[in-house]
Amino acid sequence: MSTASAPLPQFGPGRHLLSVSQFNREGLEALFALADLVEPIAQRRSVCTVLDGAVLGSLFFEPSTRTRLSFESAFLRLGGEVTTTTGVTFSSMAKGESIEDTSRVISGYSDVMVVRHPDEGSVAQFASASTVPVLNAGDGAGEHPSQALLDTYTLIRELGARGRDLDGATIAVVGDLRFGRTVHSLIKLLSIHDGITFRLYSPPSLHLPDAIAEHARAHGNTIIVCDSVVEALEGADVVYATRVQRERMTEELHSSVRGSLLDRERLEQAGVDQHIIIMHPLPRDSRHDAFDLSNDVDDLPGLSIFKQTDNGLLVRMALFLTALGCSADSVRATLKQRPWKAELDWELG
Ligand code: ASP
């Protein structure tokens, strides 16, 4: 969570994105309308140059595959340019440079920055010294707002495809609820919706922080803590599973959590519909005996993990457009057909 004490302003042009608390329903709808608009660009059906001349400073001081590449691809798809540094070892932070100095320097080279850092509150620190908008790409066990936004966008689409609303949905959230920042941000963001029931399961050592559960309850949503995954799945429209955040815990704690978290057998035991929406922020730990979402659910029709990753591109494009004050009309004005081919014309069987 952000360490800022004053309430953060709503996200908009020229604003940092530090926390999901910067969104209300109206703000979400506006962002998601932009995400819908850029879908043909993300799918390379058309080309857009609305960010021509703009430069992204992409700073990742913690491992990332999806978040970094999708933020960077999003910027490139909108016609901007990307400069990047990954890991403390390869930046001047390894020489003792402060977050504030690094931020001030890079903001002189960029029009917007995306920052991931292992310490909770550190991205807010970056933002405090920046002269351009900073988007939080994950601050330790704190928040991961862009992930929660793409998760919510996916939930609305997937539930909609089943004739359902997000309001009133029952969502099982299972795995490492203590250190998983995606879960913290998601529960907070979903709390602005109405009548959501969260059915939680985690090992006792990895329970959801009280403050997050309280936040959901204070917004009129329901939190039910369950003793097993099977119990959490009862009546669920969606199951959101997370990886054990090994990098944020002792080896002793990590080794106490073993065995599959969610697999086909447990889904069958719970008797859920086979179209249940299965989500995960990824990466999932596919090693033998990892406490995570098993690969044996991969052929179920409700598996939505790659829809999440595809939607991540749209939502991150929408975040850049918003932060840099680009309207839907300015996007439309620079759209053109692509002259090149983007699909494989044969596939390996
Ligand atoms: N990719 C997500 C994150 O950065 C989830 C994870 O790493 O487990 O928080």
Image (cartoon, rainbow, N blue to C red):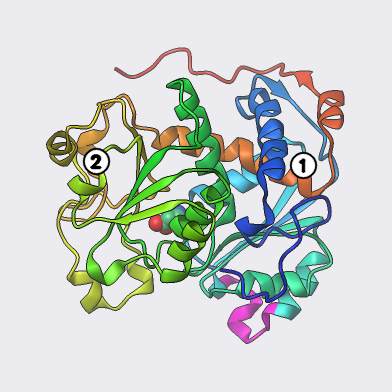
Q: Secondary structure at mark 1?
A: helix
Q: Residue at the location (61% across, 70% down)? A: 2
Q: Work out whether residue 252 or residue 224 is closer to the camera in this orientation and state it.
A: 224
Q: Work out whether residue 150 or residue 255 is closer to the camera in this orientation and state it.
A: 150
Query: In this image, 202 relative to 240: left or right?
Result: left
Q: Count every numbered label the image shows and give the total.
A: 2
Front: mark 2 or 1: 2
Q: Residue at the location (46% across, 28% down)? A: 158
- Using the image, determine if residue 132 lies above or below residue 252: above
Q: Work out whether residue 26 or residue 62 is closer to the camera in this orientation and state it.
A: 26
Q: Residue at the location (84% across, 67% down)? A: 131
CB under 8 Å between discs 2 and 1: no
Judge whether residue 180 is colored magenta. no
Q: Residue at the location (63% across, 87% down)? A: 96
Which quadrant: the N terminus? bottom right
- Looking at marks 2 and 1 on the same chain, the residue that comes earlier in the sequence is marked by 2
Quarter of the image for residue 57 reads bottom right
Q: Work out whether residue 127 or residue 162 is closer to the camera in this orientation and state it.
A: 162
Residue that numbered label 2 is attached to: 234
Outermost residue, top direction? 345
Crowding around mark 2 (Cα neighbors within 10 Å: few <14, some 14 to 19, many 20+) is some
Picture coordinates of residue 146, whole percent (x, y): 59, 50
- Using the image, determine if residue 126 lies above or below residue 215: below
Picture coordinates of residue 25, whole percent (x, y): 66, 43
**Is residue 75 something one can see in this rendering?**
no
Quarter of the image for residue 7 reads bottom right
Q: Main secondary structure of the magenta part?
A: helix
Label ID, residue 321: 1
